């Protein structure tokens, strides 16, 4: 498996620059179904840890150019 691309970008739910990563295949499939789209390659997932004790992440979605692509935030679920 190839190394996942990451970048630091602004997360509007965290309110600061945070590390983001590209979506996994399962996350892409979930988002395609959620949005009714055939492609979601432009989306990035915030991996900021909100609770160090549990490891819970923000998981807010954004695109490379739009920090707030949805009126209400869409946060990806943890998919096993």
Image (cartoon, rainbow, N blue to C red):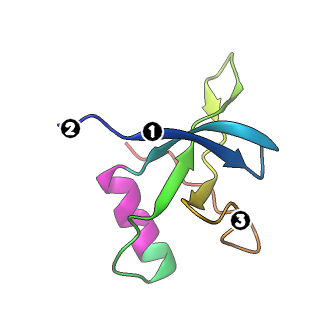
Question: What are the residue bounds of the magenta stretch?
Answer: 24-32
Mark carried by residue 68: 3
Q: Position of residue 63 (x, y in %)?
A: 55, 62
Residue 20 horizontal side relative to residue 60, left or right: left
Residue at 41% x, 51% y is 23
The quarter holding residue 26 reads bottom left
The 10 Å Cα crowd at callout 3, few under 14, some 14 to 19, many 20 or more, is some
The quarter holding residue 25 reads bottom left
Which residue bears the numbered disc 2?
A: 2
Residue at 40% x, 73% y is 32
Residue at 76% x, 74% y is 71
Q: Secondary structure at mark 3?
A: loop
Q: CA distance from mark 1 to mark 3?
A: 18 Å
Which residue occupies the foreground of this view, 34 or 6? 6
Which residue bears the numbered disc 1?
A: 6
Mark 3 or mark 2, earlier in chain = 2
Mark 1 or mark 3, earlier in chain = 1
Placement of the N terminus among the 4 image quadrants? top left
The 10 Å Cα crowd at callout 1, few under 14, some 14 to 19, many 20 or more, is some
């Amino acid at each position: 498996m190839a190394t996942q691309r990451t970048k630091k970008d602004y997360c509007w739910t965290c309110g600061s620059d945070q590390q983001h990563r590209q979506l996994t295949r399962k996350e892409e499939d979930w988002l395609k179904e959620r949005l009714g789209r055939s492609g979601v390659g432009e989306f990035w997932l915030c991996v900021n840890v909100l609770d160090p004790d549990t490891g819970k992440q923000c998981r807010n979605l954004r695109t490379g150019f739009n920090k707030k692509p949805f009126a209400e935030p869409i946060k990806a679920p943890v998919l096993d």
